[in-house]
Amino acid sequence: MLEIEEYIMIRELHAQGFSITDISDKTGYDRKTVKKILNSETHSAPNEKTILPGLDPSLQRQD
């Protein structure tokens, strides 16, 4: 899974006018991966408040 910084960098390169192939060459990610990132609306990073199935509720973060 991509780190958030890499995701942002790919989006910024595209906003600067770089093609998918150029971004792929610069980052080392496959063209299909770059295209998938650019076509997605948001980054799929897990939320801090995500409740993990099977985890004891008393061990989960309480805000």
Image (cartoon, rainbow, N blue to C red):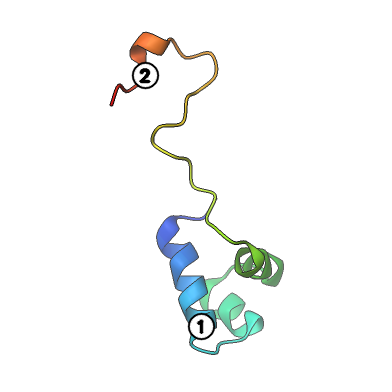
Q: Furthest residue to the front?
A: 63
| Label 1: element kind | helix
Q: Nearer the viewer, residue 27 or 20?
A: 20
Determine whether 18 is above or below 51 in the image. below
Q: Mark 1 is on which residue type? A: Ala
Q: Quadrant of residue 53?
A: top right
Q: Which mark is residue 41?
A: none
Which residue appears at 62% of the width and 86% of the height? 19
Q: Is residue 58 left or right of residue 24?
A: left
Q: CA distance from mark 2 to mark 1?
A: 39 Å
Q: Mark 2 is on which residue type? A: Gln
Quadrant that contains the C terminus: top left
Which residue appears at 45% of the width and 71% of the height? 9
Determine whether 10 is above or below 43 in the image. below
Percent x, y of residue 21 = 65, 82
The mark that comes first in sequence, 2 or 1, is 1
Percent x, y of residue 36 = 67, 64
Q: Are marks 2 and 1 in contact (CB under 8 Å)?
A: no
Percent x, y of residue 17 = 54, 90
Q: Which mark is residue 60?
A: 2
Which residue appears at 32% of the width and 23% of the height? 61
Q: Furthest residue to the right?
A: 32
Percent x, y of residue 20 = 64, 80
| Label 2: element kind | loop
The residue to which callout 1 is attached is 15
